[in-house]
Amino acid sequence: MMPGGHLATSLALGGVAYASTGSFEVAVGCFAGGFLIDVDHYADYLVFEKQWRRPGPLSFLRYYFSHCPRKHVLPLHSAELMTVLFLVILAHPWPLLVGYWFGALMHLIFDILVNGEYVLKRPVLFYTFSYRASCSFAAEKLLEIDGNATSGTTPIRDFFRWRPLEDPEVKSPSTALEEESVL
């Protein structure tokens, strides 16, 4: 799912959580888990993609939306972390952490449903850290990039979409570069 979808669903979940519990902490946790969990994409961009020279948000969005990342470490997007957090919640049900867990769970479910439909080779397994590690976090082992996604050309507009657009006439920059190197 694109960030705009996560933003909308996280705000909705936070609103429902606040209305039903009256807890601002739970609502903030829902938003953090549902939307801010994606900060690990930016960490991957800076650390593993070595893009620290271009740290700006537009550079990041353009790079990410055009399927350029070669590594997908994404430590916050993992069933293992969710399991550990759930065990901590059983021992200490802190409202902020409970909200975060539910927001992150919603985020991961939408990612599996939406991203699994168009880009992930193994949608459920992708969201386990150990599976990504066994694939060396390599995009070519984890993703099916067909080159038809047009996201990345307009990063602000793409940010607010629910899912990437596809147009068979337009190639993503990463696929175009690969095709040129083959020729």
Image (spheres, rainbow, N blue to C red):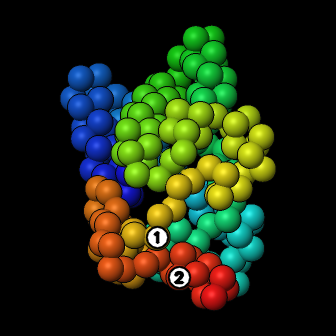
Q: Are marks 2 and 1 in contact (CB under 8 Å)?
A: yes
Q: Is residue 24 left or right of residue 64?
A: left
Q: Give coordinates of residue 177: x percent, y percent.
A: 59, 83
Q: Does any portion of residue 103 appear in the rendered image?
A: no
Q: Does any portion of residue 10 appear in the rendered image?
A: yes
Q: Residue at x 48, y 25 (%)?
A: 98
* Element class at badge 1: loop
- Seen as rendered, the residue at the extreme front is 183
* Element class at badge 2: helix
Q: Residue at x 46, y 70 (%)?
A: 147
Residue pointed to by mark 1: 147
Q: Is residue 20 left or right of residue 178?
A: left
Q: Residues within 10 Å of mark 2 (few under 14, many from 20)?
A: few
Q: Is residue 69 above or below residue 138?
A: below
Q: Earlier in the sequence, mark 2 or mark 1?
A: 1
Residue 24, quarter of the rendered image: top left
Residue 10, quarter of the rendered image: top left
The kind of residue tagged 2 is Ala
The kind of residue tagged 1 is Gly
Q: Is residue 17 left or right of residue 121?
A: left
Q: Is residue 90 above or below residue 177?
A: above
Q: Residue at x 24, y 31 (%)?
A: 16
Q: Is residue 51 above or below residue 96?
A: below
Quarter containing the C terminus: bottom right
Q: Residues within 10 Å of mark 1 (few under 14, many from 20)?
A: many
Q: Give coordinates of residue 121: x percent, y percent.
A: 54, 45
Residue pointed to by mark 2: 176
Q: Give coordinates of residue 100: x percent, y percent.
A: 48, 34
Q: Residue at x 62, y 49 (%)?
A: 142
* 3D distance between C-alphas at marks 2 and 1: 8 Å
Q: How many marks?
A: 2
Badge number at residue 50: none
